[in-house]
Image: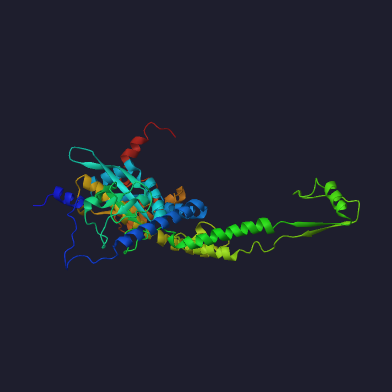
């Protein structure tokens, strides 16, 4: 009979996946040595470009930071009827500060396309273990060791890490590579294509437009400095000596940026002012490249920058569409990071994840004021009258009340006897 220990052991260290003739999985990628080298080289180049964009342009950094913050908002909580499983996850969230660290993992996943999280376990009791730490490994030093069907042939050697951050030019892992088993690494892939081992940075398709934006904005700055200056032509009647005498007489005023400049001459003279380039503000081509670059981002450009001239109705419509995008990204975060982390923690405590029915809920973004709290309570009471179960009402309250967990709402309420007892000895 298969025991719980056997199931957990089989989950953590499964039997190596060998391809069976006629019954195996068909390949989804070219696994030749040349293609492995090409994928590694291209991945290195794309991630480096994405990081250059992130580090060099505040707009790109802001779109990553704000998008990750919008996805996470006030964090998440787990709902399950299994009290022991719930307590284990609540302790995990508090011990590893998951809500704050998840924001960093989301942001860096968008930037690099991949996040490799190493799980470190420690013994918590005689028969149980727990996760003591989760660390993000350097993206460009980590490699996924799968076959042409993107399946792990040897789960004990599922990932390997190089000592330097560069693309590897060999067919197999170097001799000094650090190997990781499958259970020890959570590999989250952003914008993953089924025909690739790795994810795609959010700004991968915008690299060309980013260069156009850089060049265009540099040209505008140079034009503004060189062609935007006001030119003043001094016409002096006389010979070159008269011109030099005029310059010497007015050297305290010439070239100064004062609001009013006085010039003096004892001969017939004239001053003509030539205005600078009047078309410097015409940057429609640069705006086009900026908008095209922002098309690669899941966060609308107008919610970050350049939204001051947009109609409020259109802005509200974009925000509603953005909420749908956020829900899809939260599903990605649950599937790629949160669920593998939670289920591994349960396994280390001897709980088989398949036996636990649970759901992840995301808290609402804004804190509510007393008036909104009154409206929330009124709505909950009406739902209760309509027959909605108490468990569902507690979840609704926890979604809107920041830093309120479900166990706080599990009490029996405040009885009349307790209220009367608390009023004893008080004078009004």
| Residue 284, quarter of picture | bottom right
Rendered position, 86 above or below 33: above
Q: Which part of the image, by quadrant, shows the C terminus?
A: top left
Residue 375: x and y in percent read 43, 53
Rendered position, 23 above or below 177: below
The one of 272 and 104 positioned closer to us in this rendering: 272
Q: Count numbered badges in the picture.
A: 0
Residue 335: x and y in percent read 31, 56
The one of 240 and 129 positioned closer to us in this rendering: 240
Residue 29: x and y in percent read 29, 65
**In the shown orientation, is residue 21 left or right of residue 41?**
left
The residue positioned farthest toward the bottom in the image shown = 22
Applied colour scheme: rainbow
Q: Residue at x 22, y 65 (%)?
A: 25
The residue positioned farthest toward the left in the image shown = 1
Residue 347: x and y in percent read 22, 48
* Residue 25, visible in the rendered structure: yes
The one of 185 and 46 positioned closer to us in this rendering: 46
* Residue 364, visible in the rendered structure: no
């Amino acid at each position: 009979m298969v025991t719980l220990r056997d199931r957990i052991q089989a989950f953590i260290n499964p039997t190596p996946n060998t391809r069976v003739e006629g019954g195996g999985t068909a390949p989804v990628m070219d696994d030749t040595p040349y293609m492995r080298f090409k994928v590694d080289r291209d991945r290195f180049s794309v991630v480096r470009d994405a990081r250059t964009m992130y580090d060099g342009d505040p707009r790109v950094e802001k779109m990553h930071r704000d998008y990750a913050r919008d996805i996470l908002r006030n964090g998440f909580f787990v709902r399950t009827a299994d009290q022991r499983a719930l307590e284990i996850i609540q302790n995990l969230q508090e011990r590893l500060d998951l809500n704050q660290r998840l924001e960093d993992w989301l942001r860096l996943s968008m930037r690099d396309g991949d996040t490799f999280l190493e799980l470190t376990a420690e013994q918590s009791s005689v028969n149980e273990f727990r996760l003591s730490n989760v660390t993000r490994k350097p993206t460009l030093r980590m490699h996924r060791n799968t076959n042409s069907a993107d399946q792990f042939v040897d789960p004990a050697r599922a990932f390997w890490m190089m000592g330097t951050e560069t693309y590897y030019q060999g067919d197999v892992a170097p001799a000094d590579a650090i190997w990781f088993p499958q259970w020890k690494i959570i590999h989250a892939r952003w914008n993953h294509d089924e025909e690739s081992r790795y994810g795609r940075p959010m700004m991968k398709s915008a690299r060309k437009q980013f260069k156009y934006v850089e060049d265009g904005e540099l040209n505008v700055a140079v034009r503004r400095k060189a062609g935007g200056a006001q030119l003043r032509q001094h016409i002096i009647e006389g010979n070159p000596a008269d011109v030099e005498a005029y310059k010497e007489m007015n050297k305290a005023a010439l070239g100064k940026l004062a609001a009013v400049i006085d010039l003096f001459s004892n001969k017939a003279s004239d001053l003509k002012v030539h205005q600078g380039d009047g078309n410097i503000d015409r940057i429609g081509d640069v705006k086009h490249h900026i908008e095209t670059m922002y098309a690669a981002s899941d966060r609308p450009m107008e919610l970050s920058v350049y939204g001051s001239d947009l109609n409020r109705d259109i802005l509200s419509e974009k925000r509603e569409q953005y909420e749908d995008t956020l829900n899809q990204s939260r599903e990605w975060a649950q599937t790629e990071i949160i669920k593998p982390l939670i289920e591994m923690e349960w396994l280390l405590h001897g709980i088989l994840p398949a036996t636990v029915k649970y759901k992840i809920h995301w808290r609402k973004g804004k804190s509510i004021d007393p008036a909104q709290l009154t409206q929330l309570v009124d709505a909950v009471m009406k739902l209760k009258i309509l027959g909605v179960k108490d468990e569902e009402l507690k979840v609704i309250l926890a979604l809107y009340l920041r830093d309120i967990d479900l166990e706080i709402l599990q009490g029996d309420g405040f009885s009349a006897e307790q209220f009367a007892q608390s009023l004893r000895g008080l004078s009004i």
